[in-house]
Image (cartoon, coloured by chain):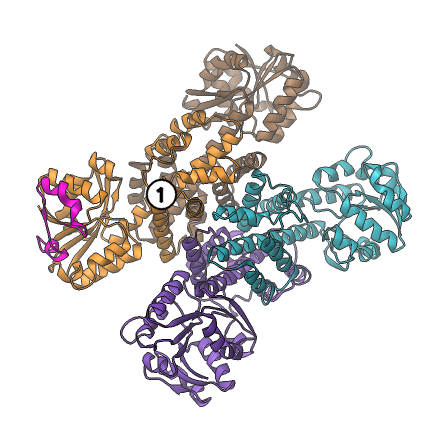
Chain colours: A purple, B cyan, C orange, D brown
Amino acid sequence: MKVGFIGLGRMGQAMAARLLAAGHDLTLYNRTPGKLQGLLQLGAHTAGSIAAAARFDGLVLTMLADDSALKAVTQGEGGLLATLPVGGIHVAMGTHDLELVRALAAAHADAGQILLSAPVLGRPDTVAAGNCGILAAGDAAALGRCKPLFEAIAARVLTVGSDPGSAAAMKLANNFLLACAIEAIGEAYSLVQKCGVERPAFHELITKGLFACPAYNIYSKIIADEAWDTVGFTATLALKDLGLAMAAGKASGVPLPSATICRDRLLSAIARGDGERDWSVMALEQARASGLG
Amino acid sequence: MKVGFIGLGRMGQAMAARLLAAGHDLTLYNRTPGKLQGLLQLGAHTAGSIAAAARFDGLVLTMLADDSALKAVTQGEGGLLATLPVGGIHVAMGTHDLELVRALAAAHADAGQILLSAPVLGRPDTVAAGNCGILAAGDAAALGRCKPLFEAIAARVLTVGSDPGSAAAMKLANNFLLACAIEAIGEAYSLVQKCGVERPAFHELITKGLFACPAYNIYSKIIADEAWDTVGFTATLALKDLGLAMAAGKASGVPLPSATICRDRLLSAIARGDGERDWSVMALEQARASGLG
Amino acid sequence: MKVGFIGLGRMGQAMAARLLAAGHDLTLYNRTPGKLQGLLQLGAHTAGSIAAAARFDGLVLTMLADDSALKAVTQGEGGLLATLPVGGIHVAMGTHDLELVRALAAAHADAGQILLSAPVLGRPDTVAAGNCGILAAGDAAALGRCKPLFEAIAARVLTVGSDPGSAAAMKLANNFLLACAIEAIGEAYSLVQKCGVERPAFHELITKGLFACPAYNIYSKIIADEAWDTVGFTATLALKDLGLAMAAGKASGVPLPSATICRDRLLSAIARGDGERDWSVMALEQARASGLG
Amino acid sequence: MKVGFIGLGRMGQAMAARLLAAGHDLTLYNRTPGKLQGLLQLGAHTAGSIAAAARFDGLVLTMLADDSALKAVTQGEGGLLATLPVGGIHVAMGTHDLELVRALAAAHADAGQILLSAPVLGRPDTVAAGNCGILAAGDAAALGRCKPLFEAIAARVLTVGSDPGSAAAMKLANNFLLACAIEAIGEAYSLVQKCGVERPAFHELITKGLFACPAYNIYSKIIADEAWDTVGFTATLALKDLGLAMAAGKASGVPLPSATICRDRLLSAIARGDGERDWSVMALEQARASGLG
């Protein structure tokens, strides 16, 4: 399939590489062209503008780091809303504010276009390894057209419904759940450690039985090893994601007290200079608040 | 092996049945003798007093519902501290206050006896099915002597160290982790539901990928189905366990903010009359606080 | 003095009336001209545009309901940044986001203009009665020039320093303190009430002794009387203000756990339909969470 | 009047001195007799036992540091329950657990005796200066008999009702409110400080206007001056009082989220070694969590 692809950071590159490997025909647009060399060698073309990517075949994927990048790419004279053909599809695959996704869906609809929301569950290495998931929501026919693309990128595609906001909300809820798990694991480690338990013994307890799943295996290990500098996802980015979950809660009238615990923990960690370490520093900050470390 | 067994509620009965099935020779003591019929048919004897159970072979397991029952069984003229022979072993297998376990360990040591802490991870049905775990801590030789008993009861035995408090602390931390997971799942369901997501779609997301483990599978299902009356563990008992975790945190200087969220949630649920429903009513109470239900 | 005044909602009208009563010469601008009749009868003029107000004498007060109104008034072709003369002064007197105030101060400075931040402590009726306070920060000479205006409006003027952000932060901190007091009073009432204390007895305790100040007197009375519909400040507006405090905390690296308690309480109250009642419904929502009411 | 007085720590001594100064006839009992010299010089007698104090005239005040001291004084062979004459009055003036007060009231009633609860609001220096308050609850006739004693000790006596638990609950709620105020003030100082505000400016804002009352004046000053070592009330004792408030909440089905914030803050402060400093170290701990100090 002919696809425009905008936003080629680490995630975008991993996704584009999988699409190319599956034989799709990609035209890439990024604000900083230098990042594209690897993909060009895999057969991708470059677009000189958002419009060129949008008009390649009226189907554009975006994988943008934040809401302001999404606004920059969609709004204004040369943006997607102005340049995507009528009937064209914009698949937003980043993690974005719920209200923004809904407003963008309405704006695309006003312009005779379609917005799909299809956030990715995973990290660049998970994507590269073919293990990520995709939550997809929006117009059914458009979802059908994009199915081969999603399957080229991800191991699991979960179709959520016709409202693009649904997929955005589920992505935020998923990241929120993960934050809560890390926070709880960190609190538990502080507790057992100050009660005289060796960390490996507690790690063994966590990873066998009730909590034997990737989330607990991975973060219990990082915390037991105090491997705060094996950065998978920074504290600063995690704070942004929690902010999006809380904003979605505010917009829909849902208090999320566990999110506020995580948020305050991250804020403290960042205030002490840990913003660029792995977000598991939540556990380090908890340890400090327990008089450890 | 010859074993005294004190405390034959639902958990105790399931454990005793497994010991009998493995060929051990049990003498039972319970305050209310009527409960013992089933086990007597499996070959158990009855003891007319705590002392008789304690002196059967100087090895007694207790599976008591709370701290006051443990105090009642150990203290006073006819209690275990007064009646267990020198060199005798008391294996406390219930979920108890950390400070109480430590004080009891010291008291047994003063009397020339040994306290092992060996709390059980699981419920009566898990025990009966042979799927429960045991966290064991205390004197190494005594642990060695009890090993065949633990293996008769549980599928997994995790030996934690020489301080009985360690096993008690890990048990509390385990239950705390589970409470936090239920709370987070409940918050997440309120969020996605008010954002228009169908509950089964979110259940599918939770149970595949990062959180594919019994804790999340089981409680996400209960919450998605609103099956608050399939009682595995009541809200009132859960509040007791969280209180023990927070007390251990207080004693060791560890704030547990996620525990306080769960505690307040349970308190609200109980205040509204849900004390005897499953502790997953935490999610129902969150739903109410979100204007749902 | 000759003064432009933009933003004539209930607060703005009360402030403008006091300025007129003190003999100042006002040119008013509001998006909806109908609101100005009362002030015109007191001798005010009207400006047909923001520019006209800005150029009246290069000194403009704004009293705007929220950040988007402040942006609308300052940005764009006809906005204050484009139309205020070099050396002109913009006194922002509403409650605004800290980062926005700082960005606006920088933008005014770039344009050769001066931003003062001078938020008002009080409500329309307090202003009318001459009992409100003003927190003023910014360029010292400009503050000096505005002193007669501040003194015409307020009973107390507290000059905070040269950074306009300081006054904005103090205003947010003040409202945050008030929210925390209301929340704590509400929790305390639920506690004593369920312990069998009559509300008037607790009101007497609160208002005599340690807490004998307007904040506690006023809100303890509202809560004791359950007078949620005597609206001084709506739950919805309170949520906005707490959001600004938390955003300031986020921007400066300060977790505010007490703010998150209040925020979640307000969110619940609003989710149940109490958004337009007085923000003391925080206490009503606490009562519900305690199984009362 | 003839009065037995048990518990002569710093508070008890200050109270006894006021009773003696008002001409009452006191018989004192304390576990450590050495503390009584000052009072004996003011005319007090000593009792050799609890029973002797109880039988002096069947009216005994107790001012005990904690629940275990209250239990020790009331229970057992020589305790108040066994030795106070029928019709005798025990006035418990310390800060105690709600459930304990209620159980003790029932036990005294069973013995034909009367328990009044009359906790004191204030510190030793406040008592000595004649500025403290008393919350009194219990049998009306007994309250009437004790009125001259209460008025000799305190400037304000607030009679709460016939249930001794009411006065105990109000005392806990009062201390809880104070903890919440300190926590909120501490959070606010961290916020404004990191926003560039000088502490004295914020102190001025707090102490004028809405919060002009002793609680805010005193603690804002301590926090602005970072005078953590001017100990009025230690962090460790504060944690005990918050625990009593939360226990009362648990017993009556009232979640107190603001209390849990304060509790976790105190736990952290204590874990870092600040247990014997003034409880305003809550603000120091907040500052640390904000990357300050």
**In this view, D40 is above or below C274:** above
Q: Which residues are magenta?
A: C29-58
* Residue A106 x %, y %: 36, 65
Residue C57, magenta (yes or no)? yes
The answer for which chain carries disc 1 is: C
**In this view, C255 is above or below C182:** below
Residue D266, magenta (yes or no)? no
| D103 and D277: which is toward the camera | D103
Residue D63 can be seen in this image: no
Q: Quadrant of residue A182?
A: bottom right
**In this view, A172 is above or below B252:** below
Tell me which residue sits at (73%, 46%) in the image. B94
| D76 and D275: which is toward the camera | D76
| D268 and B216: which is toward the camera | B216
Picture mark count? 1
| A227 and D245: which is toward the camera | D245
**Residue type beneath disc 1:** Glu
- Left or right of A249 in this view: B58: right
* Residue A16 x %, y %: 46, 81
Q: Quadrant of residue C54?
A: bottom left
Tell me which residue sits at (37%, 44%) in the image. C235
- Left or right of B168 in this view: A245: left
